[in-house]
Amino acid sequence: MLDFNQRVYREGEVIIEEDTSGSDIFMLLESEGGLLVTRKGIEVGRITRTGEYFGEMSGLLAEKRTATVRSLGTSTVHRFPGEDLEATSLPTPPCQAAHRYPRLPAA
């Protein structure tokens, strides 16, 4: 069955853009090199583990995105649409994921 919430990103493709609005939450399904997280063009982290959530702070707090997330190599990502979050059953609730992964410090 085709899953419209899964997308394959190629090397260098942007998944989340810093300073944009968005309520979607994402989960890394697989990646050749992980996902690069930058803030104002400076690397602040990498997402490398399958099942790792990202974008949850903006989705939960209705704030602008605080970082850009870009694919390193080919990556498959699942998107949980923000408008459907109450009806979506996540394997680990994003609020728990948000506590595990502290918010990025202000630049």
Image (cartoon, rainbow, N blue to C red):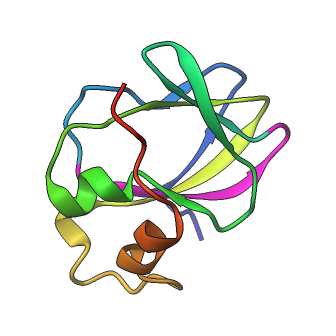
Quadrant holding the N terminus = bottom right
Q: Is residue 62 left or right of residue 99?
A: left
Number of numbered discs overlaid on the protein picture: 0
Q: Viewer-proximal residue, 51 or 101? A: 101
- The residue at 75%/50% (across/down) is 48
Magenta stretch: helix, strand or loop mostly: strand
Q: Viewer-proximal residue, 74 or 64? A: 64
Quadrant holding the C terminus = top left
Q: Dividing the picture into quarters, in which one does residue 98 lie? A: bottom left
Span of residues in magenta: 23-33
Q: Viewer-proximal residue, 90 or 47? A: 47
Farthest residue toward the top? 41
Residue 36, position as x, y percentages in the image: 65, 31
* Depicted 107 relative to depicted 100: above or below: above
Residue 83, position as x, y percentages in the image: 17, 64
- The residue at 51%/83% (across/down) is 92
- The residue at 85%/40% (across/down) is 32
Q: Is residue 105 left or right of residue 20?
A: right
* Depicted 25 relative to depicted 98: above or below: above
Q: Dividing the picture into quarters, in which one does residue 28 lie? A: bottom right
* Depicted 78 relative to depicted 72: above or below: below
Residue 7, position as x, y percentages in the image: 56, 46
* Depicted 17 relative to depicted 40: above or below: below
Is residue 13 covered in magenta?
A: no
Is residue 25 covered in magenta?
A: yes
Residue 62, position as x, y percentages in the image: 14, 53
Q: Dividing the picture into quarters, in which one does residue 21 lie? A: top left
